Amino acid sequence: MFVGEIVRLLEAEDRLERPIDELHGGPQLPDTVREVIGQRLRRLHPECRQLLSAASILGREFGLRELAAVAELDEDAVLGALDEAIKARVVTEAPAVGRLRFSHALVRDTLYEALSAGHRRAAHLRAGETLERFHMADPEPYLAELAYHFSEALPRGDIARAIAYAQRAGDHAIALLAYEEAARHYALALRALDLETGAVAEKRAAVLVSLGDARARAGDEPGAREAFLQAGAIAASAGLPVLQAQAALGYGGRMVWSRAYDDVHLIPLLEGALQALPPEPSPLRVRLMARLSGALRDHPSRDRRASLSAQAVEIARGLGDPATLAYALDGQYSAMMWPETSEQLLAIADEIVALAQEVGDEERATAGRLYRVNSNMELGRMTEAAEELEIVAEEAAALRQPAQLWMSTASRANLALFQGRFDDAQPLIEKAATLGERAQRRDSVLSHRLQRFVLDRETGGDPEIETLIDDAVCQFPTRPVFRCALAYIHSHRGSESRAQATIDDLARHDFAAIQRDNEYLFSLAFLADAVDALGDVRAAAVLYDLLVPYAHQNAINTDEIGTGSVSRTLGVLAAEMARWDDASRHFQDAIAHNTAMGSRPWAAHSQHDCARMLLARDLPGDCDRAHKLLVDAMREYERLGMTRWITRAAELSAAV
């Protein structure tokens, strides 16, 4: 059979899996395949071949009505002329009534490539005008075809019509969550704009903003930023403040909380757009202020971002626009992710979800739910956090955007680590890294490194972890959590001098280099364990005073890592200073808190650390209590597969 012969030739060429675009001309065909197809086509009557050439303009699948109009024949004549092609299996009936389909995309491509460029353009123009005439009452299902035909007709066709249909097709694809398709349509609009004369700055900037948005939703972060940068430059030069603001916001990414890191464009773009806008309150001004507060999260002072986000919320409440207020609150949440604001942040998250649901903003609702997960985990309300995370996973899947899918997956990985489900955590960690590469590359790399560090801390076996964390110290100079993690690694792998040097460097001005943000508590937890391993009593005293206000909290961040109850860390530090009563109290609180949260690894660690403290204190009865705690810890370590910790607990038990 004809199709079978093509497939066999493709298999011989080892090209069976090569992609074929069903509308656009595919890549150059292998000569052997072209010859086989050409031989079969030449056996057909000239009238039939001519109709097939016209059909190739319409695509892999085509309607008899449209083909008849393009060929200027009636439908019966078209069907009669194509009867020969149907018998030869060059075309087959399509599922929809009145439509046919080329038996293989290569057949269509061969016919299409045989047409001259001029013939193609004229035929595309006729096809576009025919579709436009037939579907004027309801063009939406045909926007992609209309955009394609009018774009391919250029420069012969109507430039304005090509631009308009390409934009409408892109907008329609966005509504259908077909983001890659939308980006292709906006790129067609840009190509058409290259041919238009006159004042096109506003049109070009608007299309570039749409293109950037589509690419961002599709997970093409570099491509999105390139489009937004171009749009911002055009808008700023042409005095188009609204488009300048939209470009700056788009360049900032899908997440309001994203830091600027070492990006030299983000903060200037946001600040420049703010200056260009009229001074009166507006939704765009609110959004720029909120997004700027997130971009400034690397700044050592919390004052500016707190002030910006508070002003944005105040203005948004005055505007009475729920969507704008939800965005402003999103910025306020990110600006205020401090260890002392968990309850306040939970209230903000609740309001974001309510407002987003009111206006049907699914993206903002998912952000609010993730914030709920984060705040509930910080407060130790793990049941509420887990239930909310299930909803987040469903909403992220419905949105089909890599940014939300990454956040959802990374958060599920973190919860698995926290609960000791290490076999579940490992594939989730890697899946999150793959998703994040397309959406929030810098943040996903950071999250991936930290989660691998925690997995190695608990189960061992990662030969690359020291190199990865050492590299992250250089790659993320504004994130001291990696220096804290590296100090932990060095202190437990026999590199005491390197660990001490890191601790001494961080300890300047009472550890002021470690910002009091969402990473503060678990950063200090890593340092505390390193300080304990080194016997650094002076550093332990400073860290204890810094952490004691947060004794009731859980040191965790949704998409990164957690170290359980802060009381465990305080117990370790108090024991290092021989403050036995404080240490005993903190460890009892930590055991109870971690057990209640279902954090099996950290409950076992709290038992293990408490046993070490009891043996060091050595009061009557302490050895018996230590032995019981170690037995319980070792049982849990064994159930969780934490071999490294079984060995450590067994060595301590032998000393008892």
Image (spheres, grey):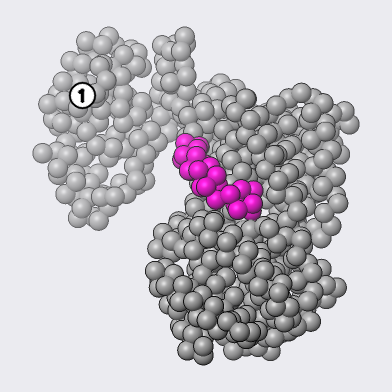
Looking at the image, which residue is at 51% across and 75% down? 629
- 526 with respect to 4 (left or right): right
Which is more toward the observer, 397 or 559? 559
On screen, 132 above or below 349? above
Q: Position of residue 157 (x, y in %)?
A: 52, 23
- State whether residue 181 appears in this view: no
**Disc 1, SS:** strand
Residue at (55% x, 27% y) in the render: 171
Tell me if 157 is positioned left or right of 319 in this view. Answer: left
Instruction: Identify whether 502 is placed above or below 68.
Output: below
Q: Quarter of the image for the N terminus: give it.
A: top left
Q: Which stretch appears magenta?
A: 375-403
User: Is residue 194 placed above or below 371 in the rendered structure?
Assistant: above
| Residue nearest the viewer, comparing 423 with 418 | 418
> Principal SS element in the magenta part?
helix
Residue 509, horizontal then vertical, whole percent: 85, 73
**Which residue is at a point 57% across and 65% down the rendered structure image?**
591
Which residue sits at x=79%, y=28%?
317
- Residue 380 drawn in magenta: yes
493 in magenta: no
Amino acid type, callout 1: Glu
Location of residue 7 in the rendering, given as x and y in whole percent from the top left corner: 19, 46
- Using the rendered view, name the quadrant where residue 246 is placed: top right
Q: Nearer the viewer, residue 483 or 54?
A: 483
| Image location of residue 61, percent across then percent down | 30, 27
Q: Which residue is mark 1?
A: 93
Task: Classify 10 Å Cα crowding around label 1: few (below 14), some (14-19), many (20 and above).
Answer: some
Outermost residue, right side: 279
